[in-house]
Amino acid sequence: MPIALIVLAAGQGSRMQSDLPKVLHRVAHAPLLAHALRAGGVLQPDRVVVVAGHGGEAVEAATRALDPEAVVVRQAEQRGTAHAVAQASAALEDFSGDAIILYGDTPFIRPETLDAMLAARAEGADVVVLGFEAADPGRYGRLIVQDDRLERIVEAKDATPEELAIRLCNSGVIAADKHLLFELIEQVGADNAAGEHYLTDIVALARAARRAARVVICPEAETLGVNTRADLARAEAAFQDRARLDAMATGATLTAPETVFFAHDTVIGRDVAIEPNVVFGPGVTVETGATIRAFSHLEGCHVSADCVVGPYARLRPGAELDRGVKIGNFVEVKAAQIHEGAKINHLTYIGDAEIGARVNVGAGTVTCNYDGVAKHRTTIGADAFIGSDTMLVAPVTIGAGAMTGSGSVVTDDVPDGALAMGRARQETKPGYAERLQQAFRARKETR
Ligand code: UD1
Ligand code: CA
């Protein structure tokens, strides 16, 4: 059965107190909208329609970046959830199949849950609503169920005290045949406490038309919606909990999982060890057997098998570590390919560079890549030895097997196998230290 996702994302999200549209606030470095699209994406939908309104331009641009095939339609005025879904009708004119309504601010619906909803459809339910037992039903719509059949949904604002006592609540996620869905939505009025066109009314309308409606129940955590910054923090915590468990389930060791933060797209291999207080920005892959030591920050980088990174290392976008590379404390690497077995262990900045296999970079080395206007590259051949406190003034190339003397400022290329020294020659004056100290003391006494 072909599937169309309709993702509602028009609301202002006024309780976020933000200039950014709510669905563009981020969890694990991805907008809420991306999480919602990913949740629905597991069904491999044939069509995706995002209904944008507040901050429509920004939402449209974000949608295009996330899924170039998605269609964005505008809901100029937010006149209720049914009215929002109706905006998708023209975009789905030529589509036949099931429509599933998701929400841009509800990031954690699991694939199993959507599968269960489709299974209920396959078993003959015309309208399937995703419900949950709410710990605090508050302002959620209540599901009125009789003998396994869903009869109607009543919004909290319109509910009687008896209905308010019901804890089975509406998540808002609905699956139905597309043609039936829009047929029902056309009949929805706005004669209710909010004066809105409630999507939830389609259940009673379906029942009146002798159609079958059913509830599929999921855990409340899955339907977690984001309305406030506090909700956003809770969503982040929920994401991280799950990501830590996933990493461990696939064979990573996390010494203190509650202190490790993943991004939405972090990939961690088997037998990777992650020490406490490690933070992953977007775009990181860590392969089998690598160790990420405490207090490291990784972003947009690739760590190959058996590397050791940290403690206190920073890998920035474009850091490519081949197998068995060692990056030690207070080392920053950006846009640099580090070949197999190279060691950069202490207090160093490597940016816009290529470092050959088995190179040893001494403590305090800096690739001086920026001249205030442009960035320049540093290339170091295999087996070279960079002495401590070498300033590599790019563009510069150090040949294979070459060496630089400690404290050198290297501005010219160094051929293979050569030794480059770029520093003042040492002068040693016997006895001078003692004489100098005496002079200083004498000066102090006469003051
Ligand atoms: C809705 C449901 C309620 C359910 C709850 C779950 C209705 C009438 N009520 O209530 O039964 O328990 O969600 O969270 O559907 N939106 C638009 N355009 C609009 C109105 C809403 O895009 O014109 C979007 C909002 O951005 C939001 C979502 O739809 O993401 C839900 O709308 P909201 O007004 O928050 O509905 P609730 O009152 O929470
Ligand atoms: Ca809501």
Image: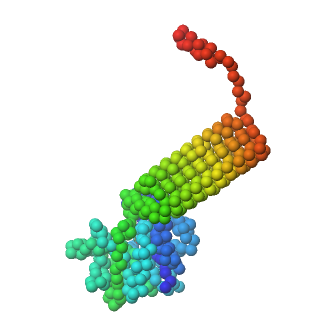
Taking the image as drawn, is residue 82 in sight? no
Residue at 37% across / 58% down in the picture?
230
Residue at 62% across / 56% down in the picture?
323
Q: In the displayed structure, does residue 426 sit left or right of residue 246?
A: right
> Considering only vertical position in the picture, is 165 above or below 416?
below
Q: In the displayed structure, does residue 419 sit left or right of residue 60?
A: right
Q: In the displayed structure, does residue 42 sit left or right of residue 438?
A: left
Please state the total of marks drawn on the protein image: 0
**Looking at this rendering, what residue extends furthest in the top direction?**
446
x then y, percent, for residue 29: 49, 59
x then y, percent, for residue 411: 73, 40
> Considering only vertical position in the picture, is 370 above or below 317?
above
Taking the image as drawn, is residue 361 in sight? yes
> Considering only vertical position in the picture, is 265 above or below 397?
below
* Displayed quadrant of residue 67: bottom right
x then y, percent, for residue 241: 41, 61
Residue at 31% across / 82% down in the picture?
150
* Displayed quadrant of residue 12: bottom left
